[in-house]
């Protein structure tokens, strides 16, 4: 799929011509205007989808060994650790019966792979370390790893600095199935505003101020609230839909 999305006509996917310009700040939503976003939520026979999955040649670079495994996953617990700064914490607390139903996937970049190997954490012949399947990618937007599992019905994203200590099936039962919900978001331990998070990202040199300003401008334009908690009642409808569509 391309940076600018795909056209769907008569059940077929048409890949538009790729753009040659690729920047570190990838604008994964396709950099639509607010009017284009509004139009994208209307039901038409032909629709252009800004999907966010792209590379210079179209699509993410997934190895032939990882693709078949990822296509089997129906429930996924995923983490993304890039830049070599985070350790890999093994999940605990799951039932043995659920372990066979859940894929545990850690997305690493090459820097993290080399850092972990230098510390003695070697990926096995089965491409795992403990319960985690290690998938090495260098062009993955950090929050979109779950989108690479075409048959997954449920996914749980875990911060790479955290240890997952619950049974995944129990988490889905408690947070989704009982209330007939489709999305659950945990509260950040230190911040509950994306604007405060933006300041922290710049302070910790995770991105340049210019990159962050582009994203914050988009959030402002889409009506993401300034208060300390995200409220679906206060954001514009298409901003809320955008979050749901991403997940």
Image: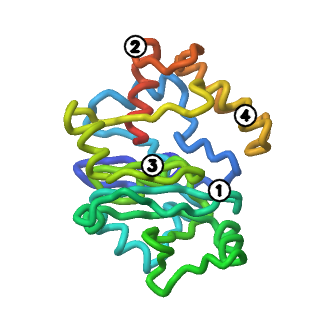
Between disc 4 and disc 2, the foreground one is 4
Q: What element carries label 1?
A: loop
- Identity of the residue furthest to the bottom in this view: 125
- Residue 151: tell me if it is visible: no
Crowd tier of the residue under label 1, counting other residues whose Cα lies within 10 Å: few below 14, some 14–19, many 20 or above? few
Residue receiving disc 3: 157
Residue receiving disc 2: 233
Residue 20 numbered mark, or none = 1
Image quarter of residue 70: bottom left
Indicate which disc, 3 or 1, sits on the residue closer to the N terminus. Answer: 1
Between disc 1 and disc 4, the foreground one is 4
Indicate which disc, 3 or 2, sits on the residue closer to the N terminus. Answer: 3
Residue receiving disc 4: 200
Q: Tags 4 and 3 in contact by the CB under 8 Å rule?
A: no
Q: What element carries label 2?
A: loop
Q: Tags 3 and 1 in contact by the CB under 8 Å rule?
A: no
Give the percent coordinates (x, y) of residue 94: 33, 58
Give the percent coordinates (x, y) of residue 41: 35, 29
Measure the C-alpha gap from mark 3 to mark 1. 31 Å
Indicate which disc, 1 or 2, sits on the residue closer to the N terminus. Answer: 1
Crowd tier of the residue under label 4, counting other residues whose Cα lies within 10 Å: few below 14, some 14–19, many 20 or above? some
Between disc 3 and disc 1, the foreground one is 3
For residue 119, side relative to residue 132 (left or right): right
Between disc 3 and disc 2, the foreground one is 3
Q: What element carries label 3?
A: strand
Between disc 1 and disc 2, the foreground one is 2
């Amino acid at each position: 799929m391309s940076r600018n999305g795909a056209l769907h006509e008569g059940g077929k996917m048409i890949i538009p011509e790729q753009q040659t310009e690729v920047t570190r700040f990838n604008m994964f939503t396709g950099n639509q205007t607010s009017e284009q976003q509004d139009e994208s939520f209307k039901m038409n026979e032909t629709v252009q989808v800004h999907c966010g999955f792209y590379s210079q040649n179209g699509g993410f670079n997934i190895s032939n060994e990882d693709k078949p495994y990822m296509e089997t996953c129906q429930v996924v617990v995923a983490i993304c650790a890039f830049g070599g700064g985070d350790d890999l914490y093994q999940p605990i607390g799951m039932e043995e019966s659920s372990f066979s139903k859940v894929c545990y996937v850690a997305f690493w970049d090459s820097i993290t792979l080399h850092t972990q190997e230098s510390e003695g954490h070697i990926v096995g012949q089965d491409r795992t370390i403990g319960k985690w399947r290690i998938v090495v990618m260098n062009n993955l937007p950090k929050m979109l790893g779950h989108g690479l599992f075409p048959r997954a019905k449920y996914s749980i994203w875990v911060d790479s600095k955290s240890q997952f200590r619950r049974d995944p099936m129990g988490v889905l039962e408690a947070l989704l199935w009982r209330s007939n919900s489709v999305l659950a978001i945990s509260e950040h331990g230190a911040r509950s505003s994306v604007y405060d998070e933006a300041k922290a990202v710049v302070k910790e040199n995770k991105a340049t101020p210019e990159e962050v300003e582009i994203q914050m401008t988009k959030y402002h334009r889409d009506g993401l609230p300034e208060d300390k908690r995200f409220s679906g009642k206060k954001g514009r409808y298409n901003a809320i839909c955008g979050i749901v569509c991403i997940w």
